[in-house]
Image (cartoon, rainbow, N blue to C red):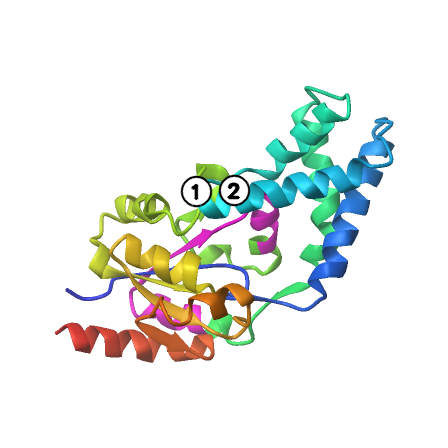
Amino acid sequence: MSIRGVLFDLGSTLIEYRGDWREVFKRQTRDLIAALREAGLNLPDDFGARYDALVDQFYTRGQQDWIEYTAEYTLQLALTEAGYPDQPTGLIKRALASAFAEGEKLWRPFDDAYQTLDTLNAQGYRLGIISNARDAANVERLIDNAHLRPWFDPIVISANVGVRKPNPRIFQLVLAAWQLEPDEVVMVGDMLDADILGAHNAGLRGIWAVMQAERGANDAHSDTIKPDGVIQKLSELPELLKKLDSAMA
């Protein structure tokens, strides 16, 4: 059975990050607090530290149980603890948008992204995105900033569906939408645990994109999670798909 669909991760797979993660995370919290105070909330001095602790707590829990705890949920909980329960959804969304704004400027498409997507599209592959992210609006803006939306349907974001890679359920959503079998679809991503293990959990093959894959988590899994193929750049993908197809024949 030949490959008919290709799923992509977003960050560090289709778009690359040009910045200092630590500085951006600090800036996010500062900008979030500034937006909330501008909205009239008299937050305590330790609010930022408590919010950051909750983000870390829910990220770790999400990694363990493959559930997505959204940025809106985490912020609402932090505000409740600070004495501001039941804040309007619009305020929460605006504050989070302010927090993510500077970081969003530091992502750009890989140089060969458009050419590769055009090639895959011309060859008849169905293309989709599955992104682990605690804020869906942030991902949607990144996709639009990079002008990637025309190539992809569906776009599945963990914050919208409640589960995150490597949970097989998030892959099954796309299989059902495409009405394809698992061995007709491959997943391309930079994380061995989320993308490659996730693909394997759902019966898909996984292609490891290593353009920005130097992470401690990948080092930890390098001996136990084996991708079905590796690409050093996106433009290598069309030829690799042909090789995978030939191996199946």
Which disc number belongs to residue 132? none
Q: What amino acid is found at the position of numbered circle 2 in the picture?
A: Arg
Residue position for label 1: 65
In the shown orientation, is residue 61 left or right of residue 207?
Answer: right
- What segment carries the magenta color? 116-142
Q: Say which quadrant the C terminus sits in.
A: bottom left
Q: Is residue 199 left or right of residue 81?
A: left
Q: From this viewpoint, is residue 223 visible?
A: yes
Q: Secondary structure at mark 1?
A: helix
Residue carrying label 2: 61
Secondary element under disc 2, as helix, strand or loop, is helix
Q: Nearer the viewer, residue 41 or 225?
A: 225
In percent of width and height, residue 72 lies at 62, 34
- 98 displayed left or right of 240: right
The image shows residue 28 at horizontal and vertical percentages of: 75, 49
Which quarter of the figure is the N terminus placed in? bottom left
Label 2 crowding class (10 Å Cα cut-off): few <14, some 14-19, many 20+? some
How much space separates mark 1 and mark 2, taking CA atoms?
A: 6 Å
47 displayed left or right of 182: right
User: Is 135 included in the stretch rendered in magenta?
Assistant: yes
Tell me which residue sits at (47%, 66%) in the image.
220
Based on the picture, tell me whether residue 111 belongs to the magenta stretch. Answer: no
Give me the residue at 52% from left, 70% from top: 213
For the residue pair 94 and 222, the one nearer the viewer reads as 222
Residue drawn at (81%, 46%) of the image = 30
